[in-house]
Image (tube, rainbow, N blue to C red):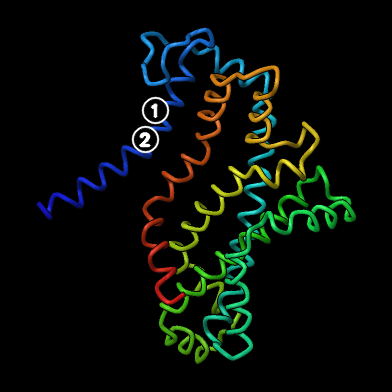
Amino acid sequence: MRKLAAPAAGIAIGLVHLIPFFIMLNLALKAPTDISSKWVTPHYVYLDNFVNAWSQAHLDRALSNNIIITATSVTFVIVLGSLAAYPLARYPTRWNNFVYYLSISMLIVPALTILVPLYKFIVDLGGINTYWAISLIQVTFSLPLSIFMFTGFIKTIPRELDEAALIDGCSRYAIFFNIILPLLKPVTATLIILTGLAVWNDFQFSLFFLQRRTVQTVPVILSQFFSQFQNNVAWVAAGCLISMIPMTCVYLFLQKYFVSGLAEGAVKG
């Protein structure tokens, strides 16, 4: 019985996570006038929900905004996080340890607690409705996790590699970019997925800092289908399915690195 308990629990957890997707797929394939239960699979396929969601929400523009913001944020998170993690992992001085623990302590700070001063700061900078401001905010709140995982992963890489490269005349920058960075593929793939999903699905920051419709992201655009005068659940479900495609492709491409990077990046964090 004990041998069957773990697989049974895994299957149960998997089914629980599939329930929202099943409901969303059912709603997306039903006509808006179909009032049957969301649990009942339709005997027809109604694709107008996808057409209406795409045209009414201008999902082409919203997806472009998502791609620009996500790609920019993830790039800076990976570059800055890895560069910061290398000296923190290789030189555990008192000051570096202080910086490391200070950075990872930011993981427990809820973003909404500083939303008001952050909004005032971005307004003063003229960053409302700009890609650079929302990307900078995403990078700021994603860097602590990046530093934590990169530092833990680099600590698992033998120091002898650095010492051998130094003997051969390599600089610290050459060691990092030519030796350490190529070894960071698993944790880099993990952070691309985790950070990419967080930025792609972000609603709280995008709602406040992207107020002009032309720069709004998919979550904010789709939320506008719910109001006092309309409730287009089927369109939202269809839009959500469309918005899932890019990040699903990224995950499928990087999944072989995901588990190993997630585990090894926290071993010595």
Residue 2 relative to residue 162: left or right: left
Dot 1 lies on which element?
helix
Seen from the viewer's position, the closer of residues 36 and 90 is 36
In which quarter of the view is residue 23 placed? Answer: top left
Q: Residue at x 45, y 69 (%)?
A: 183
Label 1 Cα crowd, 10 Å radius (few <14 / some 14-19 / many 20+): some
Q: Position of residue 131 (x, y in %)?
A: 76, 46
Tell me if residue 193 comes above or below residue 243 in the rendering.
Answer: below
Rendered image: mark on residue 22: 1
Residue 18: which numbered mark, if any?
Answer: 2
Residue at image location 49% in from the left, 20% down from the top? 28
Three-letter amino acid code at disc 2?
Leu
Q: Residue at x 70, y 30 (%)?
A: 61
**Residue 262: which quarter of the image?**
bottom left
Residue type at mark 1 is Phe
User: Secondary structure beneath disc 2?
Assistant: helix
Residue pictured at 43% horizontal, 50% vertical: 254
Percent coordinates x, y for residue 251 in the rendering: 45, 46
> In the displayed image of the protein, which residue is found farthest to the left?
1
Q: Is residue 24 above or below residue 113?
A: above
In depth, the one of 256 and 236 nearer the eye is: 236
At which x and y percent is residue 160?
42, 87
- Asked whether disc 1 touches disc 2, contact meaning CB atoms under 8 Å apart, the reply is yes
- The local crowd at label 2, few if under 14, some if 14 to 19, many if 20 or more residues have their Cα within 10 Å, is few
Q: Quadrant of residue 143?
A: bottom right
